[in-house]
Amino acid sequence: MVESTHKKETVAELAIRARGLLKETKLLQLTKSANILIDLYGIKKAFKRIKPKRIGQQIEMTFPPLDNSITFTLVSKKEDFHCVFGKPEDPVSIITINAEADKILKVVSEILVLKDNIFGLMRLIPKIITRKIKIKGSLIAAILLCRFLMMGKHEIYKGQL
């Protein structure tokens, strides 16, 4: 009888660990996808806007349903862009994506297809007002990151928006 109770605890612990690994895997895939998308379709012009004092600043993008975050570092060249899984040591800005776990990709995709101009930024305002996206810290750094991620001006999106 004691052994069966021990087995139930072990199964419960395994289930918790499995859920944690699944969340971590989703975020690792999102991190890898961001790196690939910026490498293939990123707009070089967005990176040239970075002032020298902003280079190297870290921005944390958190996903509460997945219990973790992605760290983005501001760089001046597209080739140097690299985001990593995990929390940064000293973020200048924290962007929180408040969406259900299965809707996170949709919210991030909506940012990716926006054009890197004032109208693209204006389309983010409803998400900020409805608190789907929260920004804490440097608003300028957060906007610069969003502009890195906005690929709507790339030729693959011509005629789709």
Image (cartoon, grey):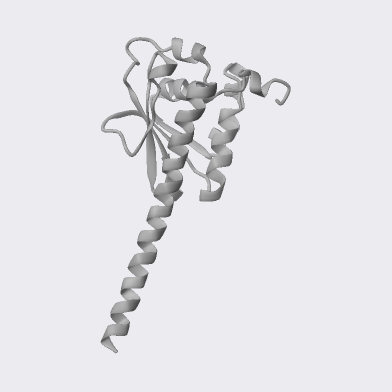
- Near-viewer residue (147 or 34): 34
The C terminus appears in which quarter of the rendering? top right
Question: Is residue 12 visible in this depiction of the protein?
Answer: yes
State how many labels appear.
0
**Would you place residue 41 above or below residue 70 in this image?**
above
Return the x and y of residue 34 as percentages of the image width and height: 47, 31
Return the x and y of residue 44 as percentages of the image width and height: 49, 13
Quarter of the view holding residue 114? top right
Q: Is residue 33 left or right of residue 123?
A: left
Return the x and y of residue 60 as percentages of the image width and height: 37, 33
Quarter of the view holding residue 90? top left
**Would you place residue 102 above or below residue 133 in this image?**
below
Q: Is residue 76 left or right of residue 101?
A: left
| Residue closest to the far right | 159
Question: Is residue 96 visible in this depiction of the protein?
Answer: no
**Would you place residue 2 above or below residue 147 in this image?**
below
The residue depicted at 33 percent of the width and 67 percent of the height is 13
The residue depicted at 37 percent of the width and 44 percent of the height is 68
**Would you place residue 97 above or below residue 101 in this image?**
above
Q: Is residue 21 left or right of residue 88?
A: right
